[in-house]
Image (cartoon, rainbow, N blue to C red):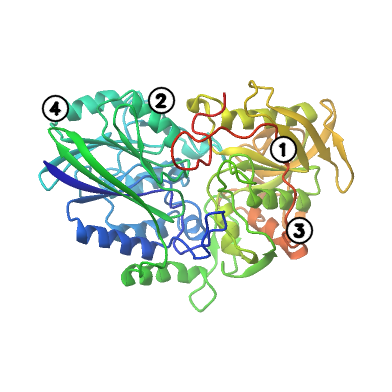
Amino acid sequence: MAELTIVHIGDLHGHLVPRPNVRGDGTGRAEGGLAHLAAMVAQIRAERPASLLANTGDTIQGSAEALFTRGQALVDVVDRLGVDLFAPGNWDYLYGKERFLELFGPGTGSGPSRTRWGAVAANVYHAGTRDLLLPPYLVTEVAGLRVGVVGLSSERAVNALGPWVTEGIEFTDDGHEVPAHVRTLREEEGVDLVVLVSEFGLAKNVLIAEVNPGIDVVLSSDMHEETRDCVVTSTGALVSEVGQDGTRLARLDVTVEGGRVTGHRYRLHTVDAGTAPDRGVARLVDEVRAPFLAGPAFRPHVNPLNGAVLDRPIDDVVGRTEVGLHRSGFCGEGYPAAVEGTSHDFLSAAICEVAGTDVGHLRGFRYGTHVAPGPVRLEDLYHYLPVGAQLARTTVTGEQLRRSLEDSADGTFNPDPFRWTGGWVHAYAGVRYALDVFADKGSRVSAVQVRRGDGDWSDLEPGATYTLAGYWYPRVPDKVGGIDGGEVTVLGRAGAALDGPGAAGGPGAAGAVDVTEHVVDHLARHVVRAEEPRVRLVRPLPDRLWSFPEIQPLRGAR
């Protein structure tokens, strides 16, 4: 008999310092912060030397510090945590293949995988080949226990931008590689315990465990769910997911005997000031943040994705909000995150106002932060918009808009999680509608209305033309917000049409304006105030499957 403790973190999304929790379960105390997280990890390791620390992806994206250093700020700090196991997430590929391999590829680490943090991924290939970017698995020994670890990275490219971000990389999306590696670990490597570290998200990872009975533990990320009790599958696998932004840490103690788990104890901890920060990590966080904050160390930074220049400190106050901003509500709350969130309502409204369009579009991405009522700082905006997007406007037909609504709903609530498209329902300022998540594909959305400018609401007309604003990237110049519309106008300073080199975007482009600056312009004119929900649920979202509240229904809706 042997005992092992697994410490699980994931979906840090670039967060270095604590942030508020303005969701219904908030206590008023700030949560997260890598210095507090590091101290909690150290406490557990001191108590349980036979332990492994797993990080399950989406680490080096989600903040200004991450973006402008192409992930280095996060790598430098997380290196201090001593991560043993790592499954990269889709956002960890944001800076391209070369940068990904520079940070996590073979030769970047000294452990059994020879990759930084023990990075493993059985489903990510050099394009056009069957050669893997990373080892598919690793074997490590802890206190005489042989542990085999299979990795699944994201099952998709960075959909919010486009497949061009991950040029040279191919992903598979069904986990078909897992059974062979589990057999190898059991039959050839002679491991006592098989762990799957996976960024496929809780819903898919549970299904993968159900059809792979050789898996003992699954450490999951992507959906930002919080398993307050670990999921126990029909095959006996123990499954954990740990929220977002470094605000949660899971501890799983397992007893292993005869090649199987005979006992376990699971706890999901909130990371906050109840644990004193690790002083060394706190100093390092201060060091990597100093060039971005007001003070003598501040310097301008060039956005590596679009060439726009950050020329002001990120702790500058750029606006105010009267409502808590977030997109993390549980099913059954007034703003369930899978459908809507105050942060996305605000940001899409800002896009709409700056561009002067009928509709403002924003993808339903899961990353972000929480902002309490009061000042809004530039760094808050970079937590929401750290993807190098510019802003453009175009025209779409009513039928295109309706189809976009339906596609987004199906990508969130399809009863087969493997048909989900990543993220949640998109945000559409200037649009309101009814949503029946239980209806058939193509029939979930009804009673769609659009408000042109400051006018009255009117029914969507399939053949009518509407103006729409949203994300724009020079690699897909004919799309705005991922939609093929009419003529595209890229917006520069103060919402003016951008002509010349800046419209081409890319590093070094003169005149490129990041979408964050457009939101800053909006905040100079408007305080963020509460608005009525834009989406009316015809029927409540599905009931939870397990003891903990769900953010996205884990079996969709049927």
Residue matched to label 3:
494
Q: Is residue 17 above or below residue 329?
A: below
User: Which mark is first along the chain, 3 or 2?
Assistant: 2
Residue matched to label 1:
536
For the residues marked 1 and 4, what is the alpha-carbon distance in whole angstroms? Answer: 55 Å
Left or right: where 209 falls relative to 111: right
User: Which mark is first along the chain, 2 or 4?
Assistant: 2
Q: Residue at x 15, y 25 (%)?
A: 187
User: Which mark is first along the chain, 1 or 2?
Assistant: 2
Q: Is residue 228 above or below residue 273?
A: above
Residue 238 rendering spot, x and y as whole percentages: 31, 37
Residue 59 rendering spot, x and y as whole percentages: 42, 50
Q: Quadrant of residue 85?
A: top left
User: Which mark is first along the chain, 4 or 3?
Assistant: 4
Residue matched to label 4:
188
Mark on residue 174? 2
Q: Quadrant of residue 257?
A: top left
Q: Residue at x 81, y 35 (%)?
A: 449
Q: Choose mark 1 or mark 4, whichever is in front.
A: 1
Tell me the crowding category of disc 1: few under 14, some 14 to 19, or many 20 or more residues within 10 angstroms, Cα based: some
| SS class, disc 1 | strand
- The three-letter amino acid code for the residue at tag 1 is Arg
For the residues marked 4 and 2, what is the alpha-carbon distance in whole angstroms? Answer: 24 Å
Q: Choose mark 2 or mark 1, whichever is in front.
A: 1
| SS class, disc 2 | loop
Left or right: where 494 falls relative to 473: right
Q: Is residue 318 above or below residue 413?
A: below
